[in-house]
Amino acid sequence: MPGSQARCRARDRNNVLNRPEFLSLNQPPRREHGSGEGRGRGGPRRAPFRQQSQQEDAGGRASRDSSEGGPAADGGVKDTSRWPEQDCMQLNPSFQGIAISSLLAIDISLSKRLGMCVGAHGAGAPLRPMVNLLAFTGHALPWICGILICLWRSSTLAGQEVLINLLLALILDLMTVSGMQKLVKRRGPWDFPPGFLDVIAMDTYSFPAGHASRAVMVSKFLLNHLVLAVPLRILLYLWAFLVGVSRVLLGKHHLSDVGCGFALGFLHFSLVESVWLDSATCQTLISIGTLRWTPLV
């Protein structure tokens, strides 16, 4: 008997099913006594919670229907004045929005890549003084001062007429560009604070490019009213284009700002040509400006 018991214990130890992870296989399934009683006991307990949740859901639906123009109190009919498009979210943007966003992203990326003369350690740092000088030639201040000096030195009526109209064109360009910049308030690609000369000329924002607009307007004005040789005419066109490019190299404007500035310069030139002041009106303005005007009695 003791030997048989020892053999039984050894057999039980060697049996794989006696391991802890397999003990559940050897145990008989438990009978769920009173499962129905548990359900019966648990049923009344859960019932109030279900009724309460159903009441809350019904109340929430009623409040949403009343706030969104849902079922009416009298007939329970939905308000037909609400369009189906108002109940759905426009998850997919339009093709026009995607195209505009893509073009703006390309414009910003290219403008930042072309800003080689932005810092003192950039790729175009050796060219920075020359680019600054080229951009200064498109500034409003030297042109206005130069026209006033030429008016003071001029002695012909035809010359004074051209200079007065050019001065008015510059003032028109200056006011239009500054007004549009204040309205749009677009920052440059590098978001630098405006310089002293830019603050004087009210050129504090990026769109549109005032230097580009001014350069195109002045070049078209000079080409239309001065007799110049072909090389000089080509140089004027090239100068206007390089003035706009210089502002992009300095990181002051985007490419789209310069393009819109060129278009605005052509518009200003066409407007000044359409409202050209004659010689008598220009002489009156000169007399008022020099305090030598004698009004007719």
Image (tube, helix red, strand yellow):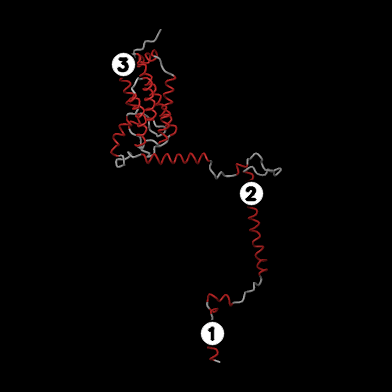
Q: Which quadrant of the rendered structure holds the N terminus?
A: bottom right
Crowding at dot 3, Cα within 10 Å, few <14 / some 14-19 / many 20+, comes out as: few
Disc 1 marks which amino acid? Arg
Q: Which quadrant of the rendered structure holds the C terminus?
A: top left
Answer with the quarter of the image where residue 114 lies.
top left
Q: CA distance from mark 3 to mark 2?
A: 84 Å
Answer with the quarter of the image where residue 257 lies.
top left
Disc 3 marks which amino acid? Ser
For the point 39% across and 32% down, the residue is 209
Q: Which residue is mark 1?
A: 11
Position in image of residue 164 (x %, y %): 37, 18
Would residue 15 appear left or right of 213 to someone viewing this image?
right
For the point 52% across and 78% down, the residue is 19
Badge count: 3
Position in image of residue 66 (x %, y %): 64, 44
Q: CA distance from mark 3 to mark 1?
A: 127 Å
Q: Which residue is mark 3?
A: 154
Position in image of residue 11 (x %, y %): 54, 84
- SS for dot 1: helix
For the point 52% across and 40% down, the residue is 95
* Observer-nearest of 133 and 237: 237
Nearest to N terminus: mark 3 or mark 1? 1
Q: Which residue is mark 2?
A: 61
- SS for dot 3: loop
Crowding at dot 2, Cα within 10 Å, few <14 / some 14-19 / many 20+, comes out as: few
Would residue 31 appear left or right of 20 to someone viewing this image?
right
Crowding at dot 1, Cα within 10 Å, few <14 / some 14-19 / many 20+, comes out as: few
- SS for dot 2: helix
* Observer-nearest of 79 and 241: 241
The answer to whether residue 158 is above or below residue 190 is above
